[in-house]
Amino acid sequence: ELHGAVVAAHERRFGVASPRALEAMSALASELAWTNRPASAEAWARRAVDGFRRLAPDERAPDALLILARILANSGANLEGLACCAEGRTLAAATDTLAVLAPRIALVEARCLRALNRHAEAERALQSSHPALAPDAPPYRRVPVEVIAACMELYADWSAAEPEARLVE
Protein backbone atom coordinates (compact mmCIF):
# COMPACT_ATOMS: atom_id res chain seq x y z
CA GLU A 1 0.00 0.00 0.00
CA LEU A 2 2.14 2.80 -1.33
CA HIS A 3 -0.57 5.43 -0.76
CA GLY A 4 -0.94 4.35 2.87
CA ALA A 5 2.79 4.88 3.39
CA VAL A 6 2.54 8.29 1.69
CA VAL A 7 -0.35 9.29 3.98
CA ALA A 8 1.66 8.24 7.04
CA ALA A 9 4.72 10.14 5.82
CA HIS A 10 2.69 13.31 5.17
CA GLU A 11 1.03 13.04 8.58
CA ARG A 12 4.42 12.71 10.29
CA ARG A 13 5.98 15.58 8.36
CA PHE A 14 3.12 18.06 8.01
CA GLY A 15 0.62 17.00 10.68
CA VAL A 16 -2.59 15.00 10.54
CA ALA A 17 -4.73 17.91 9.35
CA SER A 18 -2.34 19.33 6.76
CA PRO A 19 -3.69 19.81 3.22
CA ARG A 20 -0.95 17.53 1.88
CA ALA A 21 -1.90 14.71 4.24
CA LEU A 22 -5.59 15.19 3.41
CA GLU A 23 -4.83 15.15 -0.31
CA ALA A 24 -2.89 11.91 0.17
CA MET A 25 -5.90 10.46 2.03
CA SER A 26 -8.13 11.33 -0.92
CA ALA A 27 -5.69 9.69 -3.31
CA LEU A 28 -5.63 6.60 -1.11
CA ALA A 29 -9.44 6.52 -1.03
CA SER A 30 -9.56 6.74 -4.82
CA GLU A 31 -7.01 3.93 -5.17
CA LEU A 32 -8.91 1.73 -2.72
CA ALA A 33 -12.13 2.33 -4.63
CA TRP A 34 -10.46 1.33 -7.90
CA THR A 35 -9.13 -1.86 -6.30
CA ASN A 36 -12.61 -2.81 -5.07
CA ARG A 37 -12.18 -2.08 -1.36
CA PRO A 38 -15.19 0.18 -0.84
CA ALA A 39 -15.36 0.16 2.96
CA SER A 40 -11.73 1.25 3.35
CA ALA A 41 -12.11 3.73 0.49
CA GLU A 42 -15.13 5.35 2.11
CA ALA A 43 -13.42 5.59 5.50
CA TRP A 44 -10.35 7.34 4.03
CA ALA A 45 -12.49 9.61 1.85
CA ARG A 46 -14.61 10.67 4.81
CA ARG A 47 -11.50 11.36 6.87
CA ALA A 48 -10.10 13.55 4.08
CA VAL A 49 -13.39 15.41 3.58
CA ASP A 50 -13.78 16.01 7.31
CA GLY A 51 -10.25 17.44 7.43
CA PHE A 52 -10.85 19.69 4.43
CA ARG A 53 -14.11 20.94 5.97
CA ARG A 54 -12.09 22.16 8.95
CA LEU A 55 -9.64 23.94 6.61
CA ALA A 56 -12.26 25.42 4.29
CA PRO A 57 -11.96 27.01 1.93
CA ASP A 58 -9.26 24.91 0.27
CA GLU A 59 -9.11 24.34 -3.47
CA ARG A 60 -8.54 20.59 -2.93
CA ALA A 61 -11.74 20.13 -0.89
CA PRO A 62 -14.13 19.89 -3.89
CA ASP A 63 -12.06 17.10 -5.43
CA ALA A 64 -12.08 15.20 -2.12
CA LEU A 65 -15.88 15.57 -2.01
CA LEU A 66 -16.12 14.30 -5.57
CA ILE A 67 -14.07 11.22 -4.68
CA LEU A 68 -16.37 10.56 -1.72
CA ALA A 69 -19.45 11.12 -3.90
CA ARG A 70 -18.21 8.52 -6.42
CA ILE A 71 -17.52 6.01 -3.65
CA LEU A 72 -20.99 6.60 -2.18
CA ALA A 73 -22.61 6.21 -5.61
CA ASN A 74 -20.77 2.91 -6.08
CA SER A 75 -22.14 1.68 -2.75
CA GLY A 76 -25.71 2.79 -3.50
CA ALA A 77 -25.75 5.75 -1.11
CA ASN A 78 -27.00 8.01 -3.90
CA LEU A 79 -28.72 10.68 -1.80
CA GLU A 80 -25.57 11.21 0.22
CA GLY A 81 -23.58 11.19 -3.02
CA LEU A 82 -25.79 13.97 -4.36
CA ALA A 83 -25.26 15.96 -1.17
CA CYS A 84 -21.48 15.63 -1.59
CA CYS A 85 -21.80 16.78 -5.20
CA ALA A 86 -23.79 19.84 -4.13
CA GLU A 87 -21.28 20.70 -1.40
CA GLY A 88 -18.42 20.13 -3.82
CA ARG A 89 -20.02 22.42 -6.40
CA THR A 90 -20.45 25.16 -3.77
CA LEU A 91 -16.85 24.85 -2.57
CA ALA A 92 -15.55 24.70 -6.15
CA ALA A 93 -17.34 27.97 -6.90
CA ALA A 94 -15.80 29.53 -3.78
CA THR A 95 -12.29 28.37 -4.71
CA ASP A 96 -12.45 29.14 -8.45
CA THR A 97 -12.16 25.45 -9.42
CA LEU A 98 -15.75 25.05 -10.66
CA ALA A 99 -14.90 25.36 -14.35
CA VAL A 100 -12.57 22.38 -14.07
CA LEU A 101 -14.69 20.24 -11.73
CA ALA A 102 -18.24 21.00 -12.93
CA PRO A 103 -18.26 18.37 -15.72
CA ARG A 104 -16.96 15.65 -13.38
CA ILE A 105 -19.44 16.65 -10.67
CA ALA A 106 -22.27 16.54 -13.23
CA LEU A 107 -21.34 12.98 -14.25
CA VAL A 108 -21.51 11.76 -10.65
CA GLU A 109 -24.78 13.68 -10.08
CA ALA A 110 -26.27 12.08 -13.19
CA ARG A 111 -25.24 8.64 -12.00
CA CYS A 112 -26.82 9.18 -8.58
CA LEU A 113 -30.00 10.63 -10.09
CA ARG A 114 -30.26 7.74 -12.56
CA ALA A 115 -29.99 5.24 -9.69
CA LEU A 116 -32.80 7.12 -7.92
CA ASN A 117 -34.98 6.92 -11.09
CA ARG A 118 -34.88 10.70 -11.44
CA HIS A 119 -34.22 10.38 -15.16
CA ALA A 120 -35.11 13.87 -16.38
CA GLU A 121 -32.83 15.43 -13.75
CA ALA A 122 -30.06 13.00 -14.70
CA GLU A 123 -30.44 14.01 -18.33
CA ARG A 124 -30.11 17.69 -17.42
CA ALA A 125 -26.99 16.92 -15.36
CA LEU A 126 -25.46 15.04 -18.29
CA GLN A 127 -26.31 17.85 -20.68
CA SER A 128 -24.42 20.23 -18.40
CA SER A 129 -21.43 17.88 -18.19
CA HIS A 130 -20.09 18.60 -21.67
CA PRO A 131 -20.58 21.45 -24.15
CA ALA A 132 -21.21 19.00 -26.99
CA LEU A 133 -24.41 17.84 -25.28
CA ALA A 134 -25.94 21.31 -25.12
CA PRO A 135 -29.06 21.63 -27.29
CA ASP A 136 -27.37 24.28 -29.45
CA ALA A 137 -23.99 22.51 -29.75
CA PRO A 138 -22.43 22.19 -33.18
CA PRO A 139 -22.62 18.63 -34.54
CA TYR A 140 -18.85 18.16 -34.86
CA ARG A 141 -17.93 18.44 -31.15
CA ARG A 142 -16.30 15.33 -29.67
CA VAL A 143 -17.79 13.83 -26.55
CA PRO A 144 -15.68 11.86 -24.04
CA VAL A 145 -16.40 8.14 -23.87
CA GLU A 146 -17.44 8.31 -20.21
CA VAL A 147 -20.12 10.87 -21.10
CA ILE A 148 -21.42 8.74 -23.99
CA ALA A 149 -21.51 5.69 -21.72
CA ALA A 150 -23.41 7.64 -19.04
CA CYS A 151 -25.95 8.80 -21.65
CA MET A 152 -26.44 5.26 -22.95
CA GLU A 153 -26.96 3.89 -19.43
CA LEU A 154 -29.40 6.67 -18.59
CA TYR A 155 -31.53 6.19 -21.69
CA ALA A 156 -31.55 2.39 -21.32
CA ASP A 157 -32.71 2.69 -17.69
CA TRP A 158 -35.22 5.40 -18.51
CA SER A 159 -36.71 3.44 -21.40
CA ALA A 160 -37.03 0.36 -19.19
CA ALA A 161 -38.65 2.33 -16.37
CA GLU A 162 -40.93 4.46 -18.54
CA PRO A 163 -41.22 2.95 -22.03
CA GLU A 164 -43.78 5.53 -23.11
CA ALA A 165 -41.69 8.49 -21.89
CA ARG A 166 -38.66 8.11 -24.18
CA LEU A 167 -38.55 7.80 -27.92
CA VAL A 168 -35.39 6.27 -29.35
CA GLU A 169 -34.57 7.70 -32.76
Image (tube, rainbow, N blue to C red):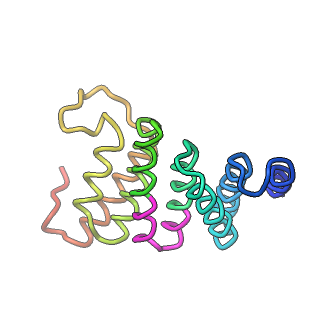
Q: Position of residue 168 (x, y in %)?
A: 19, 54
Q: Position of residue 104 (x, y in %)?
A: 45, 46
Q: Which residues are the magenta region?
A: 71-84
The vertical placement of 102 against 84, above or below, is above
The vertical placement of 80 against 131, above or below, is below
The vertical placement of 127 against 52, above or below, is above
Q: In this view, does 152 lie to the left or right of 61?
A: left
Magenta highlight on residue 76: yes
Q: Position of residue 31 (x, y in %)?
A: 69, 56
Determine the residue located farthest toward the left in the rendered image: 164
Question: Residue shown at 52%/47% (left/top)?
Answer: 57
Quarter of the image where the N terminus is located: bottom right
Q: Where is residue 26 in the image (x, y as percent from the top left)?
A: 66, 54
Q: Is residue 140 left or right of residue 45?
A: left
SS majority, magenta: helix
Image mark count: 0
Question: Residue shown at 28%/45% (left/top)?
Answer: 127
Magenta highlight on residue 58: no
Residue 43 falls in image quadrant: bottom right
Work out whether residue 15 or residue 98 is closer to the camera in this orientation and state it.
Answer: 15
Work out whether residue 116 or residue 81 is closer to the camera in this orientation and state it.
Answer: 81
Question: Residue shown at 41%/35% (left/top)?
Answer: 99
